[in-house]
Image: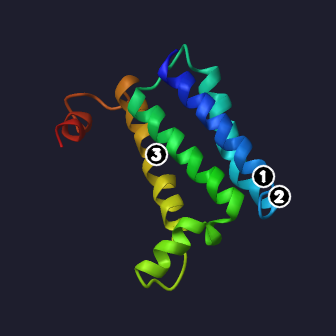
Amino acid sequence: MKYPSILLILFLIILIWSGIDPKESFTWMLEVFPAIIGVIILFLIRKSFPFTPLVYTFIFIHACILCVGGHYTYAEVPAFDWIKEVLHQSRNNYDKVGHFAQGFVPALIIRELFIRKEVVAKNGWLGFALSV
């Protein structure tokens, strides 16, 4: 079984779990919808443009973050309530994890697209970006 297939199966399990009695059904739907659309797109382009295992892994992690946030709502994820108490924070900071993923994961995807489609010449900015 190929790695992306394993991630897909794991994602579907987490998606189903997150959809069982979520805190707010409408919020759940809004949160997981982008992950579902992303999985459909990845499935459709899997042969013409397969991503690296690293990018697939981070897309999977981001999708899981969305599912967990949709199930509990971002302000009420139990593990982050515990972290809030232990670190004496004023609020549950799970939304910060989600915001980080919303910036970091698309950047990885765009980076891979730029490199593989040679959007930027290798002797110019791309060469600089790859050497960093």
Vertical comparison of 15 with 53: above or below: below
Residue 99 % position (x, y): 51, 61
Which residue bears the numbered disc 3? 105
Name the quarter where the C terminus is drawn. Answer: top left
Q: How far across and down, in percent of the image, does residue 59 sit?
A: 51, 39
Mark nearer the N terminus (3 vs 1) = 1
Colouring scheme, one of rainbow, by chain, secondary structure, one colour: rainbow
Residue tagged 2: 25
- 125 sits left or right of 26 in the view: left
Between the C-alphas of marks 3 and 1, the distance is 21 Å
Residue located at (70% from left, 57% from top): 71
Which of pointers 3 and 1 indicates the residue nearer the eye? Answer: 1
Q: Is label 3 in a helix, a strand or a loop?
A: helix
Three-letter residue code for mark 3: Val
> Relative to residue 39, is residue 14 depicted above or below?
below
Q: Which mark is residue 29?
A: 1
Q: Residue at image x 39%, y 33%?
A: 54
Q: Are marks 1 and 2 in contact (CB under 8 Å)?
A: yes
Above or below — where is 42 with respect to 86? above
Look at the numbered disc 1 and give the secondary structure of its residue: helix
Q: At 50% across and 44% down in the image, what residue appears? A: 61
**Whole-number angstrom distance, CA of label 1 to CA of label 2:** 6 Å
The relative height of residue 98 versus residue 131 in the rendered view (above or below) is below
Closer to the chain start, of discs 2 and 3, is 2
The quadrant where residue 70 appears: bottom right
* Dot in front, 2 or 3: 2
